[in-house]
Image: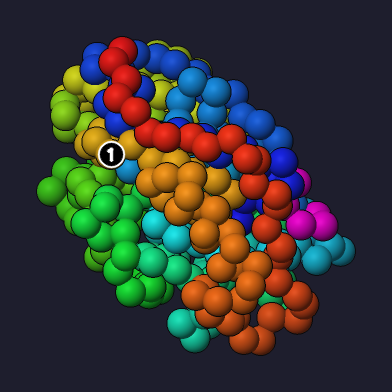
C-alpha cells in the first residue's frame, strides 16, 4: 500500500521518547486520504502525537465500500524500503504484484506480507471482475537496522492460527498471542491479531506488560477497557498491561496491534523508512531514475512518481518523555 499524499512531509518516528510506559486510553481520530479513483482511507498512524505502536508505523483503514460499479483499489507501482507491508481484508480481494515477480490475489483474513528490505516496488488493484464490497486495513512494520537491508520477498498465508474463547475468535496475523504464533516472518517482538466478537461477548485478552498496544476498530461497537471504540478509530493503550477487557455491544471486529517499543529512531517519508534525510533523498532519486527498486510486470499503467521532498533535513535525536 502506498502513501499517496502529494504533500508528504518527513517525520521522526521510533525511540522510547514517544512511548507511554503505563496503561492509558488515548483515542486516536483518523485523517482522511484519497487512494486512487474510488477508495478513501482513514489514516490512524502516523498520527499527531502518536507515530508508532511497537514496530507498527503506518495504519490505514478503508471501507466497507460498494465498488460494484467502480474500479476499486488502483494503486500503481511504487517503491518501499526499510519496512514490511501487511495487507488485511475483511471483504473483497486485492491483486498484489511486485518487482520480485510475485503475483497473488489476497482474500479476507489471508496474510499478504511483503518485506521490502533494501528496496522493492509493487502495485495493488482490485481484480477484474471483483466483489461488490471492499473493506480492510493496510499496515507497515518498520524493520530494525540489523534486518532493514535483507533481500526483498513476499509471503502469502491463507491459513492462519486461531485463538478462541466464548464469543471470541482471534486470527493471529503476525507474531504471537496466547502461545499461538503466526507463520509470517517478523523481525521484532510484536503482535497483530484480528478479533471477531459476537454481540454480548465479554473477555479478557492476555497481553505482554513490556509491549505497547493499540486497538483498531474494523466494524461494530466494542468497549475496550471501558472505552467505546467505533469503526475507523484506534485506541492507544500504552504499556504495562497483562490483560485487556473487551465487551462487544454488537457483532464486532477489531485488530490488536502491539510490540516491544521500537528503540531506534527513524525518518519516515512517503513510502520509505530510513535513518537520515540523506538516505531518504537518495531513495527518492533512485526511484525517479528507475534504479534499485526493480520493475513491476503486468500492471496496466505507469509508475507512481514521487512527490517533492522538502529541503529541511530531519535528524533523529534523543528525546525523553
Judging by the rendered image, the residue that carries numbered circle 1 is 264
Front residue of 67 and 294: 294
User: Residue 8: image x %, image y %?
Assistant: 65, 42
Residue at x 21% of width, y 57% of height = 146
**Vertical position of residue 103 compared to residue 69: above or below:** below
**Vertical position of residue 111 compared to residue 10: above or below:** below
Residue at x 26% of width, y 52% of height = 145
User: Residue 275: image x %, image y %?
Assistant: 38, 46
Question: Is residue 37 rendered magenta in the image?
Answer: yes
**Vertical position of residue 314 compared to residue 24: above or below:** below
Magenta stretch, residue numbers:
34-38
Q: Secondary structure at mark 1?
A: loop
Residue 68 visible to the viewer = no
**29 lies left or right of 319:** right
Q: In the rendered view, how is the structure colored?
A: rainbow
Residue at x 80% of width, y 55% of height = 38
- Badge 1: residue crowd in 10 Å (few <14, some 14–19, many ≥20): some
Outermost left residue: 179
Outermost right residue: 69
Magenta span: chief secondary structure: loop
User: Residue 283: image x %, image y %?
Assistant: 52, 60
Residue at x 25% of width, y 22% of height = 239
Front residue of 45 and 108: 45
Quadrant into which the N terminus falls:
bottom right
Amino acid at each position: 500500500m502506498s502513501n499517496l499524499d502529494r504533500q508528504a512531509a518527513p517525520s521522526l518516528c521510533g525511540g522510547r521518547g514517544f512511548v507511554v510506559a503505563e496503561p492509558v486510553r488515548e483515542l486516536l481520530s483518523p485523517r482522511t486520504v484519497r487512494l486512487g479513483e474510488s477508495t478513501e482511507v482513514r489514516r490512524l498512524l502516523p498520527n499527531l502525537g502518536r507515530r508508532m505502536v511497537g514496530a507498527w508505523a503506518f495504519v490505514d483503514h478503508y471501507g466497507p465500500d460498494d465498488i460494484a460499479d467502480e474500479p476499486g483499489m488502483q494503486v500503481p507501482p511504487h517503491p518501499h524500503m526499510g519496512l514490511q507491508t501487511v495487507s488485511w481484508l475483511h471483504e473483497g480481494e486485492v491483486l498484489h504484484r511486485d518487482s520480485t515477480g510475485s503475483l497473488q490475489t489476497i482474500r479476507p483474513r489471508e496474510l499478504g506480507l511483503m518485506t521490502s528490505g533494501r528496496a522493492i516496488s509493487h502495485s495493488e488493484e482490485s481484480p477484474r471482475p471483483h466483489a461488490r464490497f471492499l473493506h480492510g486495513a493496510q499496515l507497515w512494520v518498520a524493520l530494525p537496522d540489523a534486518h532493514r537491508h535483507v533481500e526483498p520477498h513476499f509471503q502469502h498465508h491463507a491459513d492462519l492460527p486461531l485463538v478462541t474463547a466464548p464469543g471470541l475468535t482471534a486470527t493471529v496475523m503476525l507474531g504471537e498471542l496466547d502461545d499461538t504464533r503466526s507463520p509470517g516472518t517478523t523481525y521484532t517482538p510484536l503482535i497483530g491479531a484480528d478479533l471477531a466478537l459476537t454481540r454480548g461477548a465479554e473477555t479478557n485478552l492476555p497481553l505482554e506488560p513490556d509491549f505497547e498496544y493499540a486497538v483498531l476498530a474494523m466494524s461494530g461497537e466494542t468497549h475496550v477497557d471501558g472505552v467505546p471504540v467505533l469503526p475507523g478509530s484506534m485506541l492507544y493503550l500504552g504499556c504495562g498491561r497483562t490483560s485487556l477487557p473487551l465487551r462487544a455491544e454488537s457483532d464486532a471486529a477489531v485488530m490488536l496491534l502491539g510490540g516491544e517499543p521500537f528503540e531506534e529512531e527513524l525518518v519516515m517519508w512517503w513510502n520509505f523508512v530510513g535513518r537520515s534525510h540523506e538516505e531518504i533523498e537518495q531513495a527518492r532519486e533512485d526511484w525517479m531514475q528507475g534504479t534499485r527498486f526493480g520493475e513491476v510486470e503486468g500492471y496496466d499503467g505507469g509508475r507512481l512518481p514521487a512527490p517533492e521532498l522538502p529541503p529541511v533535513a530531519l535528524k533523529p535525536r534523543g528525546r525523553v518523555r
